[in-house]
Image (spheres, rainbow, N blue to C red):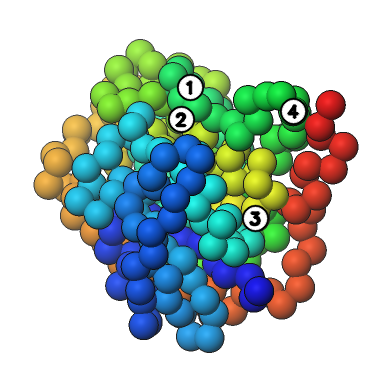
Amino acid sequence: MTEKIGVIGGSGFGSLLDNAEEVRVNTPYGAPSSKLLVGKVGRQEVVFLPRHGNEHQLPPHKIPYRANIYALKELGIGKIITATAVGSVQKKIKPGDFVIIDQFVNWTKNRADTFYDGPITTHISTAFPYCGQLNRHAYKTAKKLKIKSHLGGAIVVIEGPRFSTAAESLFFTKMGWDIVNMTQYPEVALAREMGLCYCALALVTDYDAGVIKKEGLKPVSTKEVIKVFGENNQQAAKLITKMISELPKKTTCDCRKVLENAAI
C-alpha cells in the first residue's frame, strides 16, 4: 500500500484535498474527532482530520488523541503535518510568525498519553520528538514562500481550556520556552509511539499574558487574534500544500525505528 500523508488542523484545511471522500474509522480508543477525509494533493494521497471536530466542538482536554492517531495509522499514514495556533511567550517571536516546533514541555494533567498501558511495557525516547527531516523541509519550503518562520522552538502545552495567568506565563518565559498552546501533547508523543514522522507548524496569533505584562504591551482583542489566525491559516494552507507536493523522495530520519529495543 502506498504511504499516505496525514494532515491535522482546523476544519478549513479539508478544502486542500481533491476528490475527497469521508471515511469512518473505528478504533479501540473510541471514535476519532470526526470522520476522516481521504483525497489527494496533486498525486499524493492525503488523509485529513479536524482536531477539534467539524464544528470545533471538542475542547483541548476532550480531544480523543489516541483515537485520532490510531485512525490515521490504520489508513496507512507514514507522516503527519499539523497546523496549530499558539501564543508567544518570547518577545522575539511575533504574532504572524510561524514556529516549526522541535521540543515540547508537558504541562497537562489528565490526558491518556500512551498506547502501552500494559501488559507490554514500552519506554520510547522523546529526546527529539519531532521529525528533523520534515522540520527542515518545512523551513526550506516556508523560505520559498517568504513566510517568516523559526526553525525550532519549545512549546509548553497546558491543560486548558482556560488560558495562562500572567504569573504562569512569566514562568514559561523565564524557563526559556518559546510558545504555548493546549493541543500538542499528547498528539506528538502518540505519533512517535506509532513510529510516524510528525511535523508541527505553530501559527503565532498573539503574545501570551506574561509578555504583555512584562513588556507593557497593549492587550490584543479577540477580533485582532481572529484576524491574525485567519491570515496564518491561509499561509499554512499554502505551506502544507507545497510541502506535500515537494516531499523528499527518500526518508532519512529514524522516526520509524523508535520502537526498536523500547519494549521490556
Q: Amino acid at mark 2?
A: Val
The disc placed on residue 107 is 1
Q: Identity of the amino acid at label 1?
A: Trp
Which numbered disc, 3 or 2, marks the residue closer to the eye? 3
Mark positioned earlier in the residue sequence (1 or 3) = 1
Residue furthest to the top: 167
Observer-side mark, 1 or 3, equals: 3
* Category of crowding for the residue at label 3, using alpha-carbon neighbours closer than 10 angstroms: few (below 14), some (14–19), many (at least 20): many
> Which quadrant of the rendered structure holds the C terminus?
top right
Decide which of 41, 169 is in the foreground and name it: 41
Which residue bears the numbered disc 4?
120
Callout 2–callout 1 Cβ contact below 8 Å: yes
The N terminus lies in quadrant: bottom right
Disc 3 element:
strand
Q: Please, is residue 215 above or below residue 188 in the view?
A: above
Dot placed on the residue nearer the N-terminal end, 3 or 4: 4
* Image position, residue 184 (x, y; %): 47, 39
Residue type pointed to by label 4? Ile
Tag on residue 157?
2
Q: Which mark is residue 197?
A: 3
Q: Earlier in the sequence, mark 2 or mark 1?
A: 1
Residue 258: image x %, image y %?
77, 44
Residue farthest right in this picture: 261
The residue carrying pointer 4 sits among few (fewer than 14), some (14 to 19) or many (20 or more) residues within 10 Å by Cα, namely few
Q: Quadrant of residue 237?
A: bottom left
Dot 2: element? strand
Q: Mark 1 packing: few (<14 Cα in 10 Å), some, or many (20+)? A: some
**SS category of the residue bearing label 4:** loop
Q: Is residue 232 visible?
A: no
